[in-house]
Amino acid sequence: MRISSSAHIEHPLTTGYRLHLLLGSLLLCLTLLSLFIGSNPIPVIRALQDAVTDTPSVIALILTEVRLPRTLIALFAGATLGLCGAALQGLLRNPLASPGLIGSASGAALGAVITLYMGVGTLFLPALPVGGITGALLATLLVYLLAGRDAGTVTLILAGVAINTLAMALISLLLNLAPSPYAVQEIVLWMLGSLANRSMTDLWILLPGTLAGWLLLAGTGRALDALTLGEEAASTLGVDLRHLRWRIFTATALAVGSAVSITGSIGFIGLVVPHLLRPLVGFQPGRLLWVSALGGAILLLLADMAVRLFPSGTDIKVGVVTSIVGAPFFLYLIVKSRRWQP
C-alpha cells in the first residue's frame, strides 16, 4: 500500500498550540464583547477614555465598577470550574466526575451559607470566601477520611456522594431554621449562582485561593497521563498516587471554594467542558487541563452574556442557564453510556 508523500501526521504539540490559540482568541473576543453587552448600552470606547483620563462620568463608572468586575469574575470562576473538573476526571478516571462529586462544591456552598446565615460577611468582607474555602477543605478531608488512605476510585466517589448529600441536607436545615424570610431569600438567591452586583473587591477576594489552586494543579499533567495506564503502572512510573490525590483535592477545595463563595453555586461547567474538549486533545488528561480552563471561562462568559440579554427587570441567574444547558448534556451522556453496555 502506497502512502502519498504529501500525507503527514501533525505533532500533538502543534495541534495543542493551535487549539490553545483558537480558544484564547475566542475568549479574548468574548471578553471584549461582554463589556458592550448590558441592559443599557453604553459607548465603551468613550467610557474607557473617561476611565483612563480619570474623567468622572456615569458611563465610566458602569464600565469599571459593573461590567469589568463581572467579566473578570466570570473568566476566573469559569476557568476554575473547567480546570478542576478536568483534573478530577483525570484523577478518578471517571468522565462523570466534577467538583461536586467529591463534595468540594457542596462543602464550599455550605461554608458560604453558614457565613451568610450568621451575618459575618457584613462585618468582615473576606469572611464569605474564607467560609467557602473552609467548607470545601473540610468536605474534602471528610471524603478522604471516610474512604481511607488507600481507597480505590469507586470508594472515593461513593464517599464524595455521601458528603455531598450531607452538605446539601445541612444547607436545607439552615434554610428551615433561617430567622426571617429575607434571610431565606438571600441564601436561596445566592445558591442559584449569579455574577450580578459584583465589584472589584469581590475579584480581589476571589483571586488568592483561586490562583493558589491553579498553582497546585500546574505540573500534574504527566502524572494524570500516566494514571490512564492504571494505578499500578502509574506507580511503577514514579507517580505517588496518595500525594497526587491530596494535591488535586486541595487545589480543587481552594480554587472552587473561592469561586463558589463569590459567584454562588454554578453547576455543570466542570462536567460539560472537559467532555466537549477531550476528543480535541487526543483524550490525554494532561493536555486537557488548561484547555478546559479556557473552555470553562468561555462557557461561563457566554451564559452570563445570555443572562444580560433578557429584558430589563428579568432577574435570571447564570447558574440557572448553565443548568439548563448542562442537564440535557448529562442525560445524553447517560443514554450514550447505555448504548455501549452489552
Image (cartoon, rainbow, N blue to C red):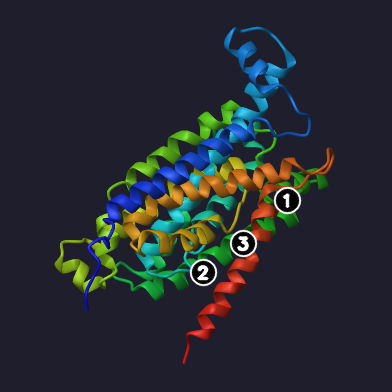
Q: What element carries label 1?
A: helix
Inspect this view and state whether residue 123 appears: no
Name the mark nearer the viewer: 3 or 2: 3
Amino acid type shown at disc 2: Val
Disc 1 and disc 3: Cα gap in Å?
Answer: 20 Å
Residue wearing tag 3: 326
Q: Distance between the residues labelled 3 and 2?
A: 19 Å
Is residue 54 placed above or below 180 in the rendered structure?
A: above
| Amino acid type shown at disc 1 | Val
Query: Quick one: label 1 or label 2, which is nearer the N terminus?
Result: 2
Residue identifier under label 1: 188
Q: Is mark 3 on a helix, strand or loop?
A: helix
Task: List x then y, in percent, for residue 301.
Answer: 60, 43
Of residues 249 and 29, the one nearer the viewer is: 29
Of the numbered discs 1 and 3, the one sitting upstream in the chain is: 1
Identified by mark 3, the residue type is: Gly
The quarter of the rendered structure image containing the N terminus is bottom left
Q: Which of 185 and 89 is in front in this view?
A: 89
* Dot 3 alpha-carbon crowd within 10 angstroms: few under 14, some 14 to 19, many 20 or more: some
Q: Mark 2 points at which residue?
A: 161
Find the distance from the CA under tag 1 to the CA under tag 2: 22 Å
Q: Quadrant of residue 226?
A: bottom left
Circle 2 SS class: helix
